[in-house]
Amino acid sequence: MERIGIVGYHQVRPELDLQMSPYECIFTAVRGALDHAGLKRKDITTVISATNDYYDGKTISNCFKVSAGGAYMKDESKVEMDGAHAAQYAMFRILSQNHKLAMVYGFSMPSCMPFECTRILELDPTFDRPISLMNSYSTCGMQMRAYMKKYGVSEEQIAEATATNWKNAAKNPLALQEAQKADMTAAEVLKSDYLASPLRELMYPLLGDGCTALILAPEKQALKITDNPVWITGVGNCQETYYFGERDLTTSLSMEKASEAAYKMAGVKPSDIDVAELFGYTACEDIILAESAGLAEKGKGDSLVAKGCLNPSGGATSGMTPCATGLNRIIEAVKQLKGEAEEHQVSGVKKAIASGQIGFCAQNNIIYVLEGGN
Amino acid sequence: MPLPDYEKKQYKVTRTMPGAWYLSNYKYKFNLSRMRIMLRGFKEGKILGVKCRGCNHVSFPPKLICGRCLVMPDQWVTLPDTGSVATGSGSPRTDQETGEIVIDPVILVRQDGADTVWIHNLPENYSFHDVYIGMPIKVHWAEELKGLWSDIEYYDPIEDMGDKINKEELAKK
Amino acid sequence: MCAKVQPAVISAGFCEHASKRSDVNMAELVNEAVEDTITKAGIEWKDIDCVINGNMPAFEGANIPELWMTDHMASKNKPFLRVTTGGTTGGSVTIAGYYAIASGMYETVLAIGFEQQSCGDTSMGLASVALGEFSIMPELGYEYNKIVSNMGAGAAIGIASYQAMSYMRRSRATEEDLARVVVQNRRNAAKNWYTHLKMPTVTIEDVLDTPYISFPLRYGMVCPATDGACAMLFTTEEKARQIADIPVYVNGVGSYSNESAVLAADCAGAGQVDPSEQLGAMKSAEVAYGQAGISFPNKEIDYAEVYAPFPNQELMWVERVGLFEENTAAEAYEQGITALNGELPINCSGGVNSTNAIGASAMERPAEAALQIMGKAGNQVPKTVHTALGHGWGGAVNLITHLVMSDEPQRKFKGGR
């Protein structure tokens, strides 16, 4: 695959209740990304947005976002999944050689919507929705219980990894202010109430309003725009089955398949990866995803967190913006590769992976292999 | 007309579940900074539009973002109180007294000097058959200006000067 | 401009459309279309590399329904994308299918568009388009009853009626002209196996007898609400030659978007002063024709499927995409140029006017166009079709998708970028 360069990005810092209108928020991110890359709106040839009508509370929500997203008279489309999936569509467009610069943005405003209700609308409407036993919390709980039971991982180990995520978020200037807990300890995590045993309140991320924009360019174009672009060298996407009865929750089949495809495309081995920025709802899910991506042995994933090479930005714990979290992970990986991540910089990063997901217990995963340098 | 096949073989074993979209639980955020200035203008009987410095497009009611230039326009211009009908339609409603169905005209108004349109009304009982595109209209202000959207009650049709000019010119020739 | 890999359509399939498909659920409905497509193509489920799909999200009360429909879409353990853009969803999905092949990343891509409108509340879904705006307007002093009456005319049918009035003023088309379009569509639909409104004996008088729904559109003129699904199979040029008898090459795509018409974000003025001007459609057409190397669309295109739920739009779109000179479409319909055996047949499938399963409609247009080239359409035109176009619109008539297909691959230029 031809390399694709990330030439510009901007993330509106998530806030619990952002004092901006949706269009203003998108505008800020898109304008910021253009300014970051030193480009003008007319340079962009295609715009791919990642928003969800249920998160916005209106049908066809993309039709009014044309102006704010810089898509006026541009080739535009919308991917109703995570922002990372939208980036893949933008890659299609660039690789086809029909387009030279693609703007990708992901946006949502959880302060305006009942997020857990919209997640219930994702369930099978005839069986799972009326039984109303499945929701974000219970599925995360089930996954965590299955993982702990199978590999003999203790609640303390998960709590330790969670506390590290909160502490990492404190070093991340773009994290939600409320998520920056520098003095979080495992004991404190274990003291919080159960949401769905063994999932505790402090193990579940906080939702923040925000928008993230990313500019992608083909190899030749990227080198003209910036001296040190970060390259996307591989991408993998996979969706596994929905029914929990058919899935092994202790591992992620979709992540295994997706990462396999991405590594093959990039020509790298899992051992080459220096930093992983993965989108899991809980620290436990982060670990499961990292193990499935081949970064650690099954059941030993929590060592990655301790080493500091899994989610140095804090992951989704640093503030989860539905539709934009995957893009945030990509941006954090880009910063690590460029050496721009100030306090949470991991030294000597050459190759990184970033992922996005949708569905319960990461039913669909998308993973990018990113490389720095020319 | 016979029923289609699918209506006939409605499966009795199918399960139907009611669902709801909890729209009442949603909140919507707005940036009123532009709208407030327009409404303050209404209070003084002025019509304010916002002009983008990049492309000189004037929008009324004011836009927050100019899609053409991707900037926030901030130059305010006073527009005349006349305009024209960009296009229109009829909205049926049941008259509460007589029970008859009345069709009210609903029009898209392009204020003179602006490059955008907004939905507004004509005086009550104005026949929608008489509405035509390009029809000149004028703002009908409310008696008391409160700085609200309702300060412009409706648009009054005014004399179409277009016909007159044409006739005079033809007479000269 | 030339795509890296030449994408081709090898098969397109439909499920049976009806106003209420209560015998199946959404997943089974989709599965019917997928099975139809895959069997027609003569390949197996495991040969599909990637699945791209979409529907109108808020109409059925299911957020990302693909999650639980995975197994019915041949997408288990496969790359998967959901592309939704309102009315154009089908067109956008088709274009995503094109790009997935053109990028060289995947070899066989299944594109699916579906809608089961009987499951949900379409009018409620459409009302929520500007629900946020409606809720802030009373606070700014906009009287509630005025919002109801003005905005009631502002939903999809309303935008169409504004557009109809403006188009009729421009082109001097009469209500009779609109009715003629409806009659052609409904009669064509009667000959196509899967369509919804089949009226083989409808006349212009019948249509003009129905009451107004929103001036100048009448009940007899507007599209129905349908349950249905459509699927298309994309693959590379080399593979298509092996699998299909007549592969259909997608040579040009465009999906350009203008500012919204009639309604705008945050209660501001709408950017499209004249909703029948359609800069987006012109630009999409221009780009798609440019990619396909078409200089004279009115001469080079043999067949067109345009997305027109309302008859005035059909007249408008065929002009805007360059098939007829401005303001002459009504005349062409009267002369029978656009009929099944005419010079330039349009919407021989019956069009959206007869079958509107929203998420699938915009995909049925390119699918029908491809089938006409293959010679396998339900209502096949007698003449040989070499080049055809599929078009779609969505949002507040601001996003237009455009696909140009041909039985010959794109002209290749050396060098490229």
Image (cartoon, rainbow, N blue to C red):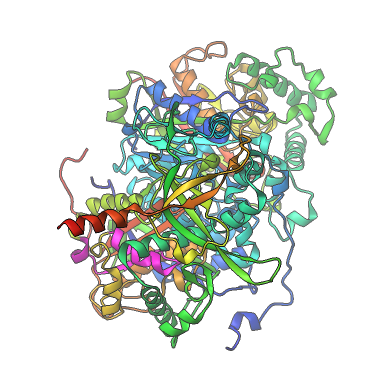
Q: Indicate the quadrant where residue A230 lies.
A: top left
Tell me if residue A293 can be seen.
no
B137 and C76: which is toward the camera:
B137
Residue at x 44% of width, y 19% of height = A350
Q: Indicate the quadrant where residue A256 lies.
A: top right
Tell me if residue A153 can be seen.
yes
Q: How many marks?
A: 0
C218 and A153: which is toward the camera:
C218
Q: Position of residue B166 (x, y in %)?
A: 25, 56
* In the image, residue C362 above or below residue C176: above
Q: Position of residue A134 (x, y in %)?
A: 75, 48
Q: Does residue A248 appear left or right of residue C221 in this picture?
A: right
Q: Indicate the quadrant where residue B146 lies.
A: top right
Q: Position of residue C138 (x, y in %)?
A: 66, 43
Quadrant of the image containing the N terminus of chain C: top left
* In the image, residue B10 above or below residue A7: below
Q: Position of residue B143 (x, y in %)?
A: 61, 42
- What is the magenta range? C297-321
Does the magenta-highlighted stretch encompass residue C313?
A: yes
Does the magenta-highlighted stretch encompass residue C153?
A: no
Residue at x 56% of width, y 28% of height = B33
Quadrant of the image containing the C terminus of chain C: top left
